[in-house]
Structure formats: C-alpha cells, structure tokens
Image (cartoon, grey):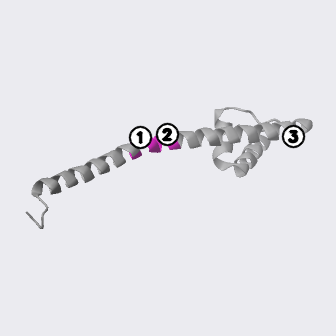
Amino acid sequence: MLGGVTIDTINIVLAALFLLVIIYIGAQVILKPIKLISKVIINSVIGLVLLMLVNYGAARFGFVLPVNIITILVAGFLGIPGILLLICFQLLLK
C-alpha cells in the first residue's frame, strides 16, 4: 500500500486510461475519413455552382465549360483560380 492506495486501484486507473486512449484513437480513425469525404463533397458542390454561373454568364458569348467530374473537382478544390484555369484551358483548345 502506498499512502492508502492499493495496487489494484492503480491497475484499474491505468486500465481506464488505456481504454480512453484506445477509444480516442479509434474515434480518430473513423472520423477523419468522414470529415475528408464531406469536405470533398461540399467543395464539389461549390465547384458545380461556380461552373453553372460561369456557363450562364458566358453563354451569351458562345463560350461553354464542360461540366464533368474533373472540371467540378478542379473548380471545387481550387475555387476561382480553378475556374480561371479551366477557362484558359478551354480557350487554348479552341
């Protein structure tokens, strides 16, 4: 006995702390991919909206950006610079 604390009490406290660490690590392993996937989906939706706005405004000039998974992801990840990059690529291909 160390000052009124038995070895069994110390073992229970250490086991509880070990269990909390394992639960924390398990939660991180499960939640990180979910956060990443949700961020990719949100950015893709924003990219789609940006592409639609550009296509709506540029249709008057006969300019259209194709809407596919690649252009949506580029616009979603890069935002406005991604849209400008897609516009430049489209102008180079014409």
Camera-side residue: 44 or 9? 9
**Cα separation between marks 2 and 1:** 7 Å
Picture quarter with the C terminus: top right
In the rendering, which numbered label is found on residue 11? none
- Is residue 19 toward the left or the right of residue 5 in the image? right
Horizontal and vertical percent for residue 77?
63, 46
Q: Amino acid at mark 3?
A: Gly
- Is residue 46 toward the left or the right of residue 16 in the image? right
Camera-side residue: 33 or 66? 33
Q: Amino acid at mark 1?
A: Ile
Pointers 2 and 1 in contact (C-beta within 8 Å): yes
Mark 2, other Cα within 10 Å: few <14 / some 14–19 / many ≥20: few
- The residue where tag 3 is placed is 57
Whichever of callouts 3 and 1 sits on the residue coming sooner in the sequence is 1
Badge 2 marks a residue whose secondary structure is helix
Horizontal and vertical percent for residue 87?
77, 44
In front: label 3 or label 2: 2
Residue interval drawn in magenta: 28-35
Residue drawn at the location 64% of the way across and 36% of the way down: 70
**Cα separation between marks 3 and 1:** 42 Å
Residue drawn at the location 7% of the way across and 63% of the way down: 1
Extreme residue toward the bottom, this view? 3
Whichever of callouts 3 and 2 sits on the residue coming sooner in the sequence is 2
Q: Amino acid at mark 2?
A: Ile
- The residue where tag 1 is placed is 30
- The residue where tag 2 is placed is 34
Q: Is residue 88 magenta?
A: no
Residue drawn at the location 10% of the way across and 66% of the way down: 2
